[in-house]
Amino acid sequence: MTDHRMPAAEVSVSVDLVRRLLDEQHPDLADLPVEELANGWDNLVCRLGEEFLVRLPRRAVAAALVAHEQRWLPELADRLPLPVPAPVRVGQPTDQYPWSWSVVPFFPGRIAARSELDDPCSAAATLGGFLDALHAPAPSAAPANPARGVPLAERAEGVVTRLAHVDPDDRAFALQIWERALAAPVWSGPPLWLHGDLHPANLLVDHGRISAVIDFGDITSGDPATDLSVAWMLFTAEQRAALRQAYGRADDATWVRARGWALALSLVFLSHSADNPLMHGIGERTFRAVLQ
């Protein structure tokens, strides 16, 4: 299933470009050292001194996601129990670079996909509490997302297509899980704020504890089961129970849908990780957890 590679950059992004943009728009930060940390699907991320990161979109679609973070994270950050990267500075488009960009706080730690948790049950409860705080009713102006927060039926075509490439020994059981999730009652409450892309590469761990939640580019509203799928990406059954208890309001239908979302997302990760071993590993772990 690993036959899709990372999208190519639509503009040239580099440390030198970051330096030029800082010198032009935020000269008080321009003397800080700049070091590339990641050049991923959507953004170039650079360390800026000791306290900051710079996020520079490398594709037009990512530029829209950065704009969502700039608009909404400052409003949400104060009521969330874990740090989130609300921008501290906003960069403007110029003749040399076409989109808005952000300076955000630097949070210590490593992504959860590459870290060990000292107490996974406690970490699961921490994440459940964070999602309980985040999942408040969202305003009508919240960003729309055609792929996250939507009814699971809207993901059906992709799931069935990708399942055709799964080992036959797993396919039948995975299809049963998917059909059970589709049969669960749909979300009937108000659209709730969602992270939209909550997986172990968007969680930071510091000193063995979940310390921050990052990359809110897919922030949207809708069915909370989308975010609750993270329970299968990072935790065992016992630990998932701790997350659900701390979250406190996931009824059985929501939990069944969350398992369906975990299956759907695991297949996406597996089918788009030809050159990304990290995401392939998350996809494989999630797929196995869903089938257990």
Image (cartoon, grey):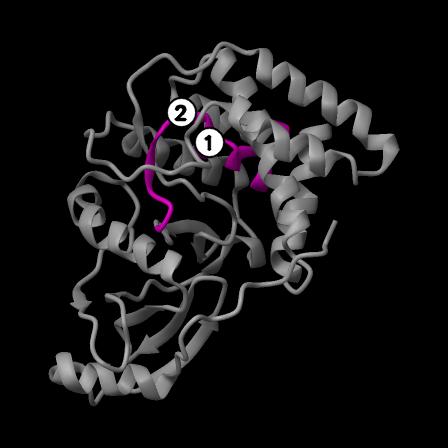
Is 49 one of the magenta-colored residues? no
Question: Which residues lie in the magenta part?
Answer: 217-237
- The tag on residue 98 is none
Q: Residue at left 81%, top 24%?
A: 172
The image quadrant of residue 81 is: top left
Where does residue 186 sit, x and y in percent of width and height? 46, 14
Choose between 191 and 37: the one closer to the eye: 191
Q: In this figure, which residue is indicated by the disc labeled 2?
A: 223
The image quadrant of residue 57 is: bottom left
Query: From where the camera sits, is residue 288 visible?
Result: no
Cβ atoms under marks 1 and 2 closer than 8 Å: yes
- The tag on residue 226 is 1
Looking at the rendered structure, the secondary structure element under dot 1 is helix
Question: Looking at the picture, does residue 142 appear above or below residue 8?
Answer: above
Where does residue 89 sit, x and y in percent of width and height? 16, 67
Choose between 219 and 3: the one closer to the eye: 3
Looking at the rendered structure, the secondary structure element under dot 2 is loop
Q: Answer few, some or many: residues within 10 Å of disc 2's Cα (few below 14, many 20 plus, some between 14 and 19).
A: many
Q: Residue at left 56%, top 18%?
A: 256
Where does residue 283 sit, x and y in percent of width and height? 65, 46
Task: Classify residue 173 as left or right of residue 73.
Answer: right
Q: Residue at left 30%, top 46%?
A: 82
Task: Report how far apart the C-alphas of labels 1 and 2 lie in the structure.
Answer: 6 Å
Is 235 one of the magenta-colored residues? yes
Q: Residue at left 37%, top 40%?
A: 195
Q: Amino acid at mark 1?
A: Thr
Q: Residue furthest right?
A: 169
Question: Looking at the picture, does residue 213 appear above or below residue 43?
Answer: above
Choose between 130 and 201: the one closer to the eye: 201
Q: Amino acid at mark 2?
A: Asp
Q: Answer few, some or many: residues within 10 Å of disc 1's Cα (few below 14, many 20 plus, some between 14 and 19).
A: many
